[in-house]
Image (cartoon, grey):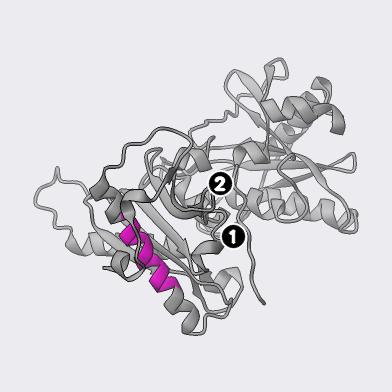
Amino acid sequence: MLIQKYNFDVKNIPIISDYEIEIDFDKKTLIVEKLLEAYELAKTNIESGNITGRGFGANVCTCGNDWTLGTNFNNTRNEISSICAERSAILGAYNKALQNFSKLSDSEKFNFKIKYICMCQYIEFQNMKTSVVPCEDCLSWLNTNRYFDDDTLIFAFELDKNNVLSLKVTSLIDLLPYRNLITSTDFSKNKKIVFSNNAEKIKNKIGLSEIFIRDMLEKTYNCYLNSKFSSISNQKIACSVLSNGKLFFANKLDWTRRWFLDPLEVAAKEAIEQGNGNNKLDAICYFGDEFSINNTAKYYDGLVSITAIGRIRQKYATCDTVILLNLNDSILVTTIGEYLPKKFIQGYKI
């Protein structure tokens, strides 16, 4: 066992969690062993010559208690040729489940859910000051509801306040606190405005009066109504970005049913270019359809792009960048840091 190889005393490994969680000794032993398997795979990935110089491993467990390992695959550093360890392992588990699935009756359904994700990076254990978390591309997968739910748990190693290697336990809802939020296309300027805790603290710093908030949302709504470029998916989404006191707008643009341009990235690009790269994105507003339509069937795939939010936070936005959302009975004003509490650190060597 790898636990013996690394001389781990499972009984005395502390558990770090923001809530009470019951993990008996056998389950704790299993999780630590699976983390070490991911650690070993990440090490092998680096030794094989991974182009990024970083090794990540993930060990995922399905509702059927089947475990699958995966590592980050990097043909180049670019997005088009890369996949993270979590998604690599999830795809492996999915294909394995399909191979084992035999439909015995018309009522039998393919039951595939990920209940545990064990994540590990290959660095020295004494350097694991913070646990590794999924990047925003992976979180965009986890933000869906077909194969994941609020009870999905993420395990990782992390040093506690006494620098003791511990088991960090996080639920998916901790990483995506708004994953069950449903927005609305029923717009009214008269809806009450609800501020999150952080948005309440910073609204005056960037001049977000209630009049301005309603005006920004109304203009984004009008942009949504005038959308002409998402006729393939039938999912209209509009976005506005506030930067240097000026608003920039964009619509979702379909290339095919599968490929599209996200309006947040397009609007942010316009703002960044006009600010010569020195500007900060103070607020964003999303408005649109939570679903796409195919042959009259609705497929719910979310509205606010986790991927796009994570990308703009890497440089031009911050955790204090405000997000405006139109809900059924109110206008929610929150921040990126509350929408995505954990920020993934890239750390590539090239």
Front residue (pair 15, 106): 15
Q: Amino acid at mark 1?
A: Trp
Seen from the viewer's position, the closer of residues 253 and 31 is: 31
Image quarter in which the N terminus is found = bottom left
Local secondary structure at mark 1: loop
Q: Is residue 38 magenta?
A: yes
Q: Amino acid at mark 2?
A: Lys
Residue 137 location (% of width, % of height): 54, 56
* Magenta region: 31-42
Magenta highlight on residue 100? no
Q: Is residue 337 left or right of residue 241?
A: left
Badge 1: how crowded within 10 Å, few (<14), some, or many (20+)? Answer: some
Quickly name the residue at label 2. Answer: 161
Q: From this viewpoint, is residue 115 visible?
A: no
Image position of 251 (left or right of 203): left
Q: Quadrant of the C terminus?
A: bottom right
Find residue 255 and name its label: 1
